[in-house]
Image (cartoon, helix red, strand yellow):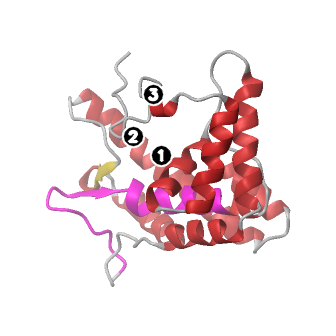
Amino acid sequence: VGVPYCSGDVMARNPGWRKSVAGWKATIDDWVHRQSPQDLLNIDIFFDGIGVHSDMRLAEAVWNHAYDRGAATPDFVKLLSLMAADWKAPLTIFGRIRTDDSGRVDLKKGGIMPIFTAARVLSIRHDVRERATPARLEGVAAKGVGAPADFAAVTDAHRTILDVMLRQQLADAVGGIALSPRVALARLDRPAQRRLREALGRV
């Protein structure tokens, strides 16, 4: 259907990603307790995963097991928190958006990734069993964690950045350019650039 294969081969065609529910639960337990960088990347998939075919109870059992184990392991949550904090906003010291040599900025790496990573960690820490980033942030805020205005500001920033990325991808698709999270800053008028700058600042 035109969707490229996963570059990391996290696919059903890979025997390592085909297990029974019991097999997945044991694998998740192992990942949570070993906590190697690759294990952390692998288990992220389960917190965002959703069943798409056959008996959905099987997928939910694995998803809930990941939450059960993650929330019950403080060291695991702490390590995920450190990973979520390891990023830099693509802004100069004067607050301008920093672009690469082609005039583009990677808004996944410098914009939405820290948001969805932090939302995932918070959802595990505070047992908010949601998959979508806005729902996770809303659920954590509803538990009285942090200031509601901060969650609202980050949710709005997420919406703004994602909108800019998707509009760029639509333009790139028409132009025959490979889709990516990299946005050409010159495409945006001044008000749009200002909104994007403010969103990145909120992140």
Mark 3 and mark 2: Cα distance apart in space: 37 Å
Mark 1 and mark 3: Cα distance apart in space: 36 Å
Residue 179 is a magenta residue: no
| Side of 105 where 50 appears, left or right | right
For the residue pair 190 and 47, the one nearer the viewer reads as 47
| Side of 104 where 85 appears, left or right | right
Residue 197 pos. (x, y %):
42, 67
Residue 112 pos. (x, y %):
48, 56
The residue that appears at 76% across and 74% down in the rendered structure is: 147
Judging by the rendered image, the residue that carries numbered circle 1 is: 163
| Tag 3 secondary structure | helix
Residue 160 pos. (x, y %):
51, 53
Q: Which mark is residue 15?
A: 3
> Bounds of the magenta span?
95-121
The type of residue carrying mark 3 is: Pro
Give the crowd class for mark 3: few <14, some 14-19, many >=20 residues within 10 Å. few
Give the crowd class for mark 2: few <14, some 14-19, many >=20 residues within 10 Å. few
The type of residue carrying mark 1 is: Asp
Res. 100 image quadrant:
bottom left
Judging by the rendered image, the residue that carries numbered circle 2 is: 167
| Tag 2 secondary structure | helix
Residue 114 is a magenta residue: yes
Q: Are marks 3 and 2 in contact (CB under 8 Å)?
A: no
Residue 85 pos. (x, y %):
51, 73
Q: Earlier in the sequence, mark 3 or mark 2?
A: 3
Q: Which of labels 3 and 2 is toward the front?
A: 3
